Image (cartoon, rainbow, N blue to C red):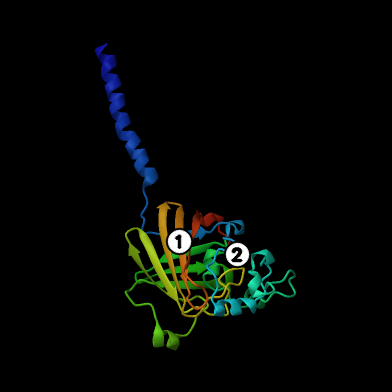
């Protein structure tokens, strides 16, 4: 009896060591390491076209100049007159279909194409297979350009961004947008000196939760967002590369 009791005690003790070790292995990841390949949710999970704040007069005018092929007339205020947009490929004026860059935030927050995140000593890089372009998120303490500095640098299809860690959340602030770019498929306007804040948090080894807020007083009567996306890790062997 004594021998059997001793065996039971040893088995229980072994279990106490094995179970926590397994749990630790499953949960182990570095929340400050976003490197790897990622993809966003499918287009069906994009926010609706009327999720933005009301337009300013300037935003309304800019929107009337655009002809996306997704605008539903039922979502366009009657006081603005006839709804913009079109229903055929021949009338849309989406710059992406005229060999222009897709631009930001569209390339990250709307398309679900795979992109790579790479950490460097002074910045974090986003590499996109689409258009073979990149974003630089500067982490060397520089300030986000504004005023005359922003005018001197000029707008960029893929903006100017600075980033820093707030705990386990990477906070990215961007400005200097190319006004011709559409931030989404609906053609919503975005001014050159608008501000976008992104917050990326690794919630497990294979999942990033992203939150984006747009502040563009020239075109909208208030901040827009946060829009929330889930980015899922893609294994290298599942990524198709093109030259």
Within-10-Å neighbours for mark 1: few <14, some 14–19, many 20+: some
Q: Quadrant of residue 95?
A: bottom right
- The picture places residue 144, in percent across and down from the top left corner, at 38, 77
* 67 lies left or right of 8: right
Q: Nearer the viewer, residue 67 or 219?
A: 219
Pick the quarter of the image with the N terminus.
top left
Left of 82 or right of it: where is 188? Answer: left
Q: Mark 1 = which residue? A: 211
Q: Which mark is residue 106?
A: none
- Residue 13 location (% of width, % of height): 28, 28
Q: Nearer the viewer, residue 55 or 152?
A: 55
Residue placed at 55% from the left, 57% from the top?
Answer: 41
Residue shown at 28%/24% (left/top)? 10
Which secondary structure lies at badge 2? Answer: loop
Query: Residue 190: percent from the left, percent from the top?
Result: 53, 76
Kindly report which numbered mark, 2 or 1, lies closer to the viewer in this rendering: 2
Provide the secondary structure element on which disc 1 rests.
strand
Q: Is residue 58 above or below residue 166?
A: below
Give the residue at mark 2. Answer: 49
- Tell me which label, 2 or 1, sits earlier in the chain: 2
Residue located farthest toward the front when viewing the structure as drawn:
79
Furthest toward the top, the residue is 1
Residue nearest the observer in this picture, 234 or 187? 187
Q: Position of residue 228 (x, y in %)?
A: 49, 59
Q: Residue at x 42, y 84 (%)?
A: 150
């Amino acid at each position: 009896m004594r021998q059997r009791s001793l065996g039971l005690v040893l088995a229980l003790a072994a279990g106490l060591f094995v179970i926590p070790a397994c749990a630790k292995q499953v949960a182990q990841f570095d929340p400050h390491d976003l490197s790897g390949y990622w993809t966003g949710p499918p287009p069906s999970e994009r926010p609706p076209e009327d999720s933005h704040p009301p337009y300013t007069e300037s935003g309304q005018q800019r929107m009337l100049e655009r002809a996306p092929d997704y605008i539903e007339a039922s979502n366009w205020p009657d006081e603005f007159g006839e709804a913009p947009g079109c229903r055929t490929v021949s009338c849309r004026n989406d710059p992406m279909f005229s060999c222009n860059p897709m631009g930001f935030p569209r390339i990250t927050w709307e398309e679900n194409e795979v992109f790579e995140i790479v950490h460097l000593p002074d910045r974090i890089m986003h590499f996109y297979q689409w258009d073979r372009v990149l974003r630089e998120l500067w982490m060397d303490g520089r300030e986000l350009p504004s005023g005359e500095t922003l005018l001197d640098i000029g707008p960029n299809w893929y903006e100017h961004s600075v980033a820093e860690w707030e705990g386990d959340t990477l906070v990215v602030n961007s400005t200097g947008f190319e006004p011709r770019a559409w931030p989404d498929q609906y053609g919503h306007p975005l001014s050159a000196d608008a501000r976008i804040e992104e917050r990326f948090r690794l919630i497990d080894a294979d999942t990033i939760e992203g939150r984006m807020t747009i502040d563009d007083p020239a075109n909208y009567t208030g901040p827009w967002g946060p829009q929330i996306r889930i980015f899922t890790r893609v294994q290298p062997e599942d990524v198709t590369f093109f030259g």
